[in-house]
Image: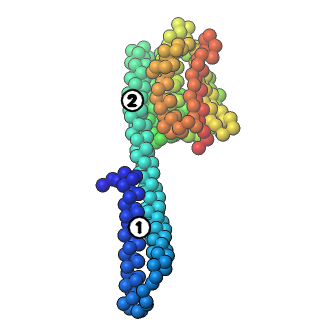
Amino acid sequence: MTYSSEQQIFLFFMVVAGTTVTLYISNNALMYFVFRYQQEDLFTGIIKGVSVFAIAFIWWLIYYIWHYIERNRSAQVDQLKLETTVKELELKTIKAQMNPHFIFNALNSIRALVDENPQRARTAITELSNILRSSMQTEKAETVSLENELNIVKDYLALEHIRFEERLNVKYEIDPDTLELQVPPMMLQTLVENAIKHGISRVIMGGSVYINSSLKGMHHIITIENTGQIVEDSINGHGFGLQSTRQRLSILFGNRASFEIRNKDERTVEATVVMPLL
């Protein structure tokens, strides 16, 4: 049963009053019947009653405060457990939404190659196999090393190069000190995939993808630049993997991480992820 604040205060004083009366009567009975003390005058009785009330009040106050703190602590622990469970479920849901989309695009690239170049198609199947293996290994992980993520990205871009050939140029600039840093699994791959889908594929002459990873103070900064342009509707919508990227960064790092995408100039889109060093 749950009591209101007023009811709890009333019950507290009732308990204190009951304890005071009980102690006062017990003390007087003990003094009179056992030790044969003479009956006290009114003033002395009042002083003793007030003293007993004060002692009972302090004792019960300490008791209630201790239990109140314990209940709050238990509630906070339960809340943290609930938030952790919710985050795990959200991460699993986001991963489940991303992986089928990625596999579909990769299989389309391989299908286009089967008749034209069977040998390259077999190599592409091996590359896809490597990506799927890495994806399954990171399915239960909240974060993976940047090096692991880059391996998936390189295999993915190798598959896309089959389709775009000379229309796709890729450049990496990776600080070696960032290779062991932790990042959300499949996040970089998702951003690169969307750079290809919404950027390079829409430009007749193709374009380039530039991936940079560096350290700045206590932050890990990943920048992806690609040929193309975005409009306001794409930024606010689901293009470029924006929704999943923001969700995952928020779940893992809260407001300590940020994600921004913008038109760097008239031909280039720049996506920037800033994460705290773990």
| Residue at 46% across, 56% down | 73
Relative depth, front residue between 92 and 3: 3
* Rendered location of residue 270, percent (x, y): 60, 20
Which secondary structure, mark 1?
Answer: helix
Residue 66 vertical placement versus 1 (above, below): below
| Residue appearing at x 41%, y 15% in the figure | 112
User: Few, some or many C-alpha atoms within 10 Å of disc 1 (few <14, some 14-19, many ≥20)?
Assistant: many
Looking at the rendered structure, which numbered label has been put on residue 16? 1
Q: Secondary structure at mark 2?
A: helix
Q: Which residue is mark 2?
A: 97
Q: Can you tell which quarter of the image residue 100 is in? A: top left
Image-quadrant location for residue 106:
top left
Q: Nearer the viewer, mark 1 or mark 2?
A: 1
Name, please, the residue furthest toward the right: 217
The amino acid pointed to by label 2 is Gln
Percent position of residue 162, x then y: 48, 18
For residue 185, above or below residue 225? below
Q: Residue at x 57, y 31 (%)?
A: 258
Q: CA distance from mark 1 to mark 2?
A: 59 Å
x, y (%) of residue 56?
Answer: 45, 71
Looking at marks 1 and 2 on the same chain, the residue that comes earlier in the sequence is marked by 1
What amino acid type is highlighted by mark number 1?
Val
Tell me the quarter of the image containing the C terminus.
Answer: top right
> Taking the image as drawn, is residue 251 in sight?
yes
Is 48 on the left-hand or right-hand side of 275? left
- Locate the N terminus by quadrant: bottom left
